Image (cartoon, rainbow, N blue to C red):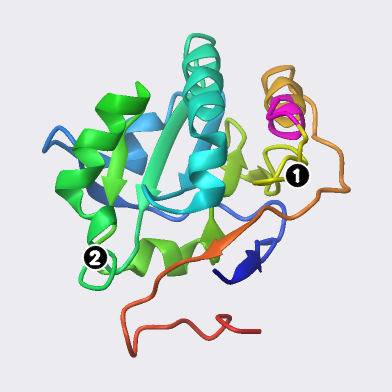
């Protein structure tokens, strides 16, 4: 398990477009959320211990903020040939088991992950109403075996700020997790830096 931090994409970056298949077999695109006051894009997967550690709290946080109008999207981009636990079929089962109420999309080509410079699972990208990046960082300071409870405090503070029309704190702690499992030969330039 390689501990990989977020690349910390520059704040103000416009949300890269996507059009991917959800666990319900429907296509979900960035344009579906143009009226949302905030958009949270999470690069995640089924098997990563870091995602498993926060999954239940993440489901709860997403449900809570979706009720306030926030658009939430999970994207799995891992190489399923080498990590079959992250296959689209397993994503369906995971979404049901965890109670994910947000779209959980599969990025088979890994091009969307590259467009976001996603590096780890989980990797959080919060965009404001203009789809400009307002926060990219950790959900909170809890990690597997840290003994720190999962509260989502960092992500919640950022979400609350965006919903209040404010900018989240400039100082943001990178998310940390397993590296995205790139298909052999498909690793982005920033991988392994």
Q: Earlier in the sequence, mark 2 or mark 1?
A: 2
Marks 2/1: CA distance? Answer: 29 Å
Q: Which residue is mark 1?
A: 146
Spot occupied by residue 169 in the image (x, y as percentages of width and height) = 86, 38
Q: Is residue 76 left or right of residue 15?
A: left
Instruction: Give the camera-side residue of 31 and 95.
Output: 95
Label 2 packing within 10 angstroms: few (<14), some (14-19), many (20+)? some
Q: Which mark is residue 80?
A: 2
Residue 86 appears in the picture as rendered:
yes
Classify 61 as above or below 94.
Answer: above
Part of the protein shown in magenta = 149-156
Instruction: Give the camera-side residue of 184 and 144.
Output: 144
Q: Is residue 125 left or right of residue 27?
A: right
Spot occupied by residue 67 in the image (x, y as percentages of width and height) = 48, 9
Do the residues bearing badges 2 and 1 touch, measured as CB atoms within 8 Å? no
Classify 104 as above or below 50.
Answer: above
């Amino acid at each position: 398990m390689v501990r990989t931090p977020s690349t910390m994409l520059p704040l103000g970056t416009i949300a890269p477009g996507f059009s991917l298949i959800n666990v319900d077999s429907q296509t979900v695109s960035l344009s579906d959320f143009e009226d949302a006051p905030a958009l949270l894009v999470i690069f995640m997967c089924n098997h990563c211990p870091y995602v498993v550690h926060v999954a239940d709290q993440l489901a709860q946080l997403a449900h809570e903020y979706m009720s306030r109008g926030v658009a939430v999207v999970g994207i799995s981009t891992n190489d399923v040939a080498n990590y079959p636990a992250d296959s689209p079929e397993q994503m369906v089962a995971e979404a049901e088991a965890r109670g994910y109420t947000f779209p959980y999309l599969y990025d088979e080509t890994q091009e969307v992950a590259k467009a976001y410079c996603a590096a780890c699972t989980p990797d959080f990208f919060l965009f404001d109403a203009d789809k400009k990046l307002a926060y990219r960082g950790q959900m909170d300071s809890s990690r597997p075996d840290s003994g720190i409870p999962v509260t989502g405090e960092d992500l919640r503070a950022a979400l609350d700020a965006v919903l209040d029309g404010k900018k989240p704190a400039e100082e943001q702690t990178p998310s940390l997790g397993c590296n995205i499992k790139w298909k052999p030969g498909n690793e982005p330039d920033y991988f392994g830096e």
